[in-house]
Image (cartoon, coloured by chain):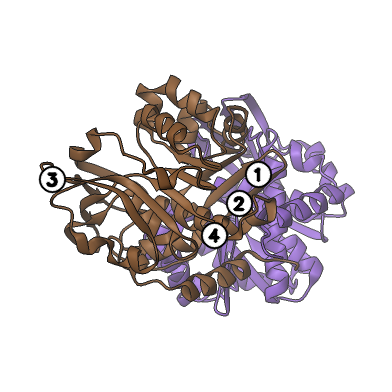
Chain colours: A brown, B purple
Amino acid sequence: MSLVVVGSFGLDTVETPFGRREEVLGGSAIYFSLAASLFTDVRLAGNVGADFPEAALETLKRRGADCSGIQVYKDQQTFRWAGRYQGDMNEAETLVTELNVLAEPPKIPDSYKGAPYVFLANMGPDTQLEMLKQLNGGKVFADTMNLWIDIQRDNLLKLLGQLDGLVLNDAEARTLTGKSNLIQAGNALLEMGPEVVIIKKGEHGAFLFAPSFHFALPAFPTDAVVDPTGAGDSFAGGFLGSLAEMGEFSPTNLRRAMAFGTVAASMTVEHFSTEGLENAARDHLERRYTQLRDFVQFDA
Amino acid sequence: MSLVVVGSFGLDTVETPFGRREEVLGGSAIYFSLAASLFTDVRLAGNVGADFPEAALETLKRRGADCSGIQVYKDQQTFRWAGRYQGDMNEAETLVTELNVLAEPPKIPDSYKGAPYVFLANMGPDTQLEMLKQLNGGKVFADTMNLWIDIQRDNLLKLLGQLDGLVLNDAEARTLTGKSNLIQAGNALLEMGPEVVIIKKGEHGAFLFAPSFHFALPAFPTDAVVDPTGAGDSFAGGFLGSLAEMGEFSPTNLRRAMAFGTVAASMTVEHFSTEGLENAARDHLERRYTQLRDFVQFDA
């Protein structure tokens, strides 16, 4: 089944204990699509500037992704982000954010409308609401961030009432609900509207909450975390990409999709920028999926 | 199989967002034994003062625990600890520590010697080395803490060379190895001697490292964390108690034991002090064990 992602395309400058990369490929839509395109046909929407390298989309196009929703603003610059990770690398310190073309709302091609699966990556909830309406998709998932919880809470709550799934990190879940216990936070988020809530916990894995069941996985055990940038969007891409491929929105498939999201994120963090996912093949993910199952299995 | 635990017996004063309790039952040997005694016959060793309430041992004795190794110092006070938990309650702020009777090394009855399983709870590595020698047990596990990593590193390294299993938390694993990545830290600890290393991560669950496999579980999903005191020792008690009951030191049993440790810890954190484990029955743990298996299962 086809999967539309609306999000950012960026040029990142990243510093970690393992090195520094300048103006490398980044952005939520890029990480998401590189993971999701290993499973299903992805349609990307979002804005880039004249300086966005055409070659950056080659892997995605080779994997059959539809890039017709990427709007090029010839007189503007691409979104830029610079950040630094230290210590346990669980959190980035943002050094620079230049929104540039992100100031314009994304444009959605007619051919994207009515897609069975949609991911609205982190952006203003007002824009997400507008995208949700324009897309009129089947199952719609969205990400958010603390900034929107602070400055657009009402729009975010309105969005939650219309979403099928919410993906956010543990700090965001705590802030949005006021609950420090994550199980309480997950349940409180379900009451705000979505059928499914996923709380990402970085190196500690992820929780899935649904009315009929809860599910959790640790992160895939990698001993080479080089650059965590994009891990959350790669998780979402692996999750929704595999779910769209499986088709049916069932508990069994949601659990499997959590595992594919987990292994997709592990491919990302082992390399700078998108290198891990650019070089990943479907069978790498399948192999890690089996390893992950073994990693948590007891009394089978 | 019988299981000897050497550790502390204490009177704790605890403050959490859910209330305050003064001079309630605590100590590593108490939490460990209350969990382990749901599975196997436990033999306790350690020191108490004249003020230690005799009634505190009733539940343990009813469950068949051997308390003959508990030494009463009539002219001294029991160990006391006071601490406070705030926010996400992942870490206690210690307010008071009065060692009192813990200044004396524990005495080991002859009847405890040669036990097939031993747990040396957190205490100075010099004392742990002495206990290990006196006990001459089968499979010996030990816990430690940052203080000993700082002030008795050489003794701790010597101990590691003689242990079958090490149980410690994530911060301790990072400090002891100098590795911020926990997979690297776990592997580095294996190289220091133990056959098995367990890294406890509080609300994020636990990792098990062995030369032939790695295993991880999230914490049991409880929405009512009232007092985390003793969670780690309860985990160790559920782990070693169930392992001693199963007998064979095999990968399959180590995985099952991790799950029983995880559910034992969940019983502790839902109540103040030892209330959760005092009131727990074996079938409660079995029920949560099944729920935990379901919680992490995918593509079965």
Q: CA distance from mark 4 to mark 1?
A: 26 Å
Seen at 72% across and 42% down, the residue is A212
Q: CA distance from mark 3 to mark 1?
A: 51 Å
Mark 4 vs mark 1, foreground winner is 4
Q: Position of residue B135 (x, y in %)?
A: 68, 70
**Parent chain of label 1:** B
Q: Residues within 10 Å of mark 2 (few under 14, many from 20)?
A: many
Tell me if I can see residue A33 in this picture. yes
In this rendered view, identify the residue nearer to me: A50 or A144.
A50
| Same-chain status of marks 4 and 3 | yes
Which circle's residue, 2 or 4, is located before the other in the chain? 2
Assess whether mark 1 and mark 2 are in contact (beta carbons under 8 angstroms): yes
Mark 4 vs mark 3, foreground winner is 3
Q: Which residue is mark 3?
A: A74
**Parent chain of label 4:** A
Q: Residues within 10 Å of mark 4 (few under 14, many from 20)?
A: many
Q: Position of residue B133 (x, y in %)?
A: 61, 73
Rendered-image quadrant of the C terminus of chain A: bottom right
